[in-house]
Image (cartoon, rainbow, N blue to C red):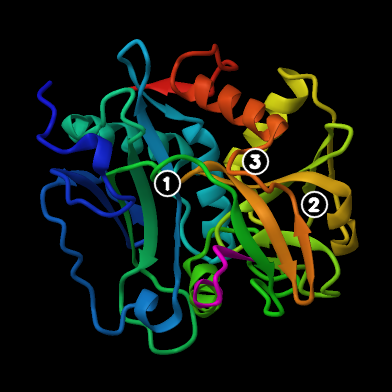
Amino acid sequence: MNKKNLDWSNLSFGYTKTDKRFVANFKDGKWDDGVLTEDDKVVISECAGVLQYAQTCFEGLKAYTTQDGRIVTFRPDLNAKRMADSCRRLVMPVYDEKKFVEACLATVKANIDYVPPYGTGAALYIRPYMFGSDPVIGVKPANEYQFRILVTPVGPYFKGGVKPISVRISDKDRAAPNGTGDIKAGLNYAMSLYNIVDAHNCGFAENIYLDPKTHQYIEETGGANIIFVTKEGKLVTPKSNSILPSITRRSLVEVARDYLNIEVEERQIHKDELKDFVECGLCGTAAVISPVGKITDHDKEYVFSNGDKMGPVLTKLYDTLTGMQMGRIEAPKGWIVEI
């Protein structure tokens, strides 16, 4: 194994073309066997379903080098299941969950020299995605699809260490009631782009969206779930059928409850409760936990940290989960898959 000559410690969280990617095609009612290819170009009709009606979904996970030199990925079976759920809701053909995991592992193995070394803070980001590829002019599902997996080495989400961010409560909605908020559809992210650019222009790192029906209950941000900590040290997470089920959040909940003996509540959280919490974080694949220092709700401000560090409970959760991912702490059976 000969690592690529990259400046591993200074990678951005961006795209770098790697040697191979996985491609499978659905046609005439079935998937082909799929191949690993050097060709990074996607050629589709100008009238492809994905271009006309945004029929696409995706996933995101990482491969890491552990402390003892193994290359592993984290709970890929949950990504496979979530993508299958997304496909069903978008009337797309499900890619077999076992084959999904096998294809992810094969794509990492084919690009093994791009997996960053342990201790650099970097990882190999894995992006499985699917889209309607044949011409569709009437509003209906496509008949043909491509399932692809690309990988790219990425640096740590936070350059210079983890520091609390400032976010705002948004007047706009991320998802419609009974809509597609609970699946990883590309259209959900397209809907949030205007609002995230506006948030950045106003000095905020992210938007917190309230429930789309009453605008009273905390849901999630445009790209991450939210977790809170009470004065008593209890972990509280929002519960709603329009929240994307983050694999990182679910893992943090299990770590808190089963490993750290932290009490956990998953329930509706009214925005007036923000004053009762002492820690807040955004959680997802990219950063694991992003600590929130301040939430602005129009003329109100809720401050969780005046310093430049993550709170003690979130730090314990972060250190335990990343310790499992990096091989410093024994993880539950099935969580770590070696490549």
Q: Which residues are magenta?
A: 199-207
Mark 3 vs mark 2, CA separation in Å? 12 Å
Quarter residue 188 falls in: bottom right
Farthest residue, direction front: 307
Compared to residue 185, the image places residue 263 above or below, namely: above
Mark 1 vs mark 3, CA separation in Å? 17 Å
Q: Nearer the viewer, mark 1 or mark 3?
A: 1
Magenta segment includes 204: yes
Q: Residue flagged by tag 3: what amino acid is it? A: Arg
Mark 1 neighbour density, 10 Å: few (under 14) some (14–19) many (20 or more): some
Name the residue that disc number 3 marks. 249
Q: Residue flagged by tag 1: what amino acid is it? A: Tyr
**Observer-nearest of 239 and 12:** 12
Q: Quadrant of the N terminus?
A: top left
Name the residue that disc number 1 marks. 157
Compared to residue 115, the image places residue 190 above or below, namely: below
Compared to residue 23, the image places residue 179 above or below, namely: below
Location of residue 152 in the rendering, given as x and y in whole percent from the top left corner: 26, 46
